[in-house]
Image (cartoon, rainbow, N blue to C red):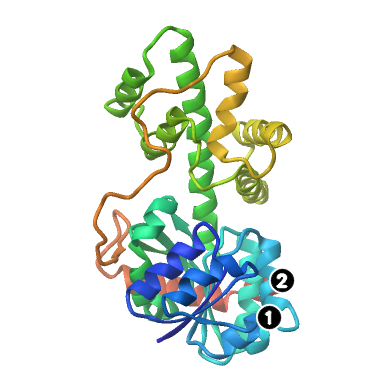
Amino acid sequence: MKIGFIGLGNVGGKLAGSLLRNGFDLTVRDLDPAAVRPLADAGARVGESPAALAASCDVAITCLPSPAASRAVLEAEDGVLAGLTPGTVWAEMSTTDEAEVRRLGALVQAKGGEPVDCPVSGGCHRAATGNIAIFAGGARAAFERLLPVLKAMGRRILHTGPLGSASVLKVVTNYLATANLVSLCEALATAKMAGMDLNTTYEAIRISSGNSFVHETESQVILNGSRDINFTMDLVSKDIGLFGAIAGRAGVPLEIAPLLIDIFRDGEARYGPREWSPNIVRRLEEACGIEIRAPGFPAEMVDDEPEEPGHEVVPKGRAPDFAAETRRQSQAVADSPHAEADAG
């Protein structure tokens, strides 16, 4: 199977590296030659354009920083759609808007392609080792065709339902991670001001009901002082904005999300949009006149778990015929009178 990969940033470059490491025939493209070079040196071909890349592969993957970037890469004169051939799978691994991925998916289907949105979750350190989690939304048949590729990039693969469903759940989980990050910053600042040792505070949280994935990763780089989690404040703002848009369309009156948007807008104004997101803690450090640091923590996260073959995760409470049911759901969505309206 020939794979094309467009977008070799903090996450995309690592996902593409997993494909190459696992023996896939890989063609890559990025606007930054420095991002392309390590993969090209390791044996990947370099696509002349998104269209040329799409024309030469069975699966065209995009992993880009925003819905606008995905739109441009697909719809430009030399974009993916211009080179897409019938039967090609378009795998959108960007964190994007579910309405936009459905719109672009309809254009892919019009060219005879098969769209799947498959964002990742778990951090850059797990993307590097192939141990990241992947959500995948789309027709069950397209998911099963793509599954060997997803298994090479991630450990836990969840088919979330129809196209767009993975993007909804990705934004939901990113919202939860952001809320957790901000609450951890407040917890660490309060512990410091209350005279607690921060090494002990870290362990107290870790062994308690307050523990979380975000604590075991982002709290460590906060305490180290690097704040380097390979994710920036502008991306947090984008993701919380996407979450707010989904909630708005669904009629959910949010209370916490607007506060998070204000906090990160202030962080961007103070420290710049490309500042590492955990450095949002600086707002509290400056307000309290403290440094939230402790010895013995790493400057960046490294996945110390060995790479394992990926596998599909079946949702809790689902019957063994889950795959058949998701096929039925995907077909029902495709046949729905709303599908054409969404595409338009």
Q: Residue 116: image x %, image y %?
A: 50, 73
Q: Which residue is mark 1?
A: 79
Task: Tell whether label 1 touches label 2 (CB within 8 Å).
Answer: yes
Q: Quadrant of residue 94?
A: bottom right
Q: Residue 290: image x %, image y %?
A: 54, 15
Q: Nearer the viewer, residue 155 or 224?
A: 224
Report the residue at 49% width, 72% height from top.
138
Report the residue at 66% width, 62% height from top.
67
Q: Nearer the viewer, residue 334 or 241?
A: 241
Residue kind at label 1, given as amino acid type: Gly
Q: CA distance from mark 2 to mark 1?
A: 7 Å
Residue kind at label 2, given as amino acid type: Ala
Q: Residues within 10 Å of mark 2 (few under 14, many from 20)?
A: few
Residue 139 appears anywhere in the view: no
Q: Residue 61: image x %, image y %?
A: 52, 74
Q: Which residue is mark 2?
A: 72
**SS at mark 2?**
helix
